[in-house]
Amino acid sequence: MSLSALSHVPIVSPLRRYVLRTVLFMAIYSLINIAAIFGVFDLWIGTPAGWMLALVVAMPIAGQIWALLRLIVDSDEYMRVLWAKRVILSAGIVMVVSTAWGFGESYAGAPSMRAWLIYPLFWTVSALVWPFIRSSR
């Protein structure tokens, strides 16, 4: 194998980079939420600083979504299609469930659902759906 051919071989696989990025972003997310649970930000609750905290907690989520998009972009063509199908199907299911629940709140008196639950719902649906998507068709 020539030296120029080796320059195109990834040292770290796209999936491994994704896992490392996800671990980093979720560690930050967890640390912020653990600090909130232990009252570090109690003085911020209900003040304009509370909005800053809300945005800070959302940033690792944005980072993790970026990591997922990078996984899709960095994967080969076949895996790119599989990852895209998995993400689209999971997001679609979450949109349908969230919309149905919202109408349930409006029309059936269902209890209000916290909006931040959409993110864990996406990953729960993904865990259930992704193993079954094994074809690019």
Image (spheres, rainbow, N blue to C red):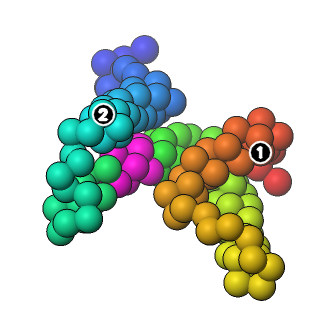
Q: Decide which of tag 2 and tag 1 comes sooner along the chain.
A: 2
Residue interval drawn in magenta? 58-67
Q: In which quarter of the image is residue 94?
A: bottom right
* Cα distance in 3D space between marks 2 and 1: 35 Å
Work out whether residue 65 or residue 57 is closer to the camera in this orientation and state it: 57
Which residue is at a point 62% across and 52% down the rendered structure image? 122
Image coordinates of residue 63 in percent, x first then y, are 35, 47
Question: Of helix, strand and loop, which one carries label 2?
Answer: loop
Relative to residue 65, is residue 3 depicted above or below?
above
Magenta run includes residue 63: yes
Which residue is at a point 52% across and 64% down the rendered structure image? 115
Q: Residues within 10 Å of mark 1 (few under 14, many from 20)?
A: some
Can see residue 99?
no
- Residue 107 lies left or right of residue 40; in this view the side is right
Screen quadrant of the C terminus: bottom right
Question: Of helix, strand and loop, which one carries label 1?
Answer: helix
Image coordinates of residue 78 in percent, x first then y, are 66, 44
Image coordinates of residue 95 in percent, x first then y, are 67, 68
Which residue is at a point 77% across and 85% down the rendered structure image? 107
Number of callouts in the render? Answer: 2
Nearest to viewer (mark 2 / mark 1):
2
Q: Name the residue under label 2.
A: 38
Q: Name the residue under label 1.
A: 129
What type is the residue that disc 2 sits on? Phe
- Residue 46 lies left or right of residue 70; in this view the side is left
Relative to residue 45, is residue 70 depicted above or below?
above
Magenta run includes residue 13: no
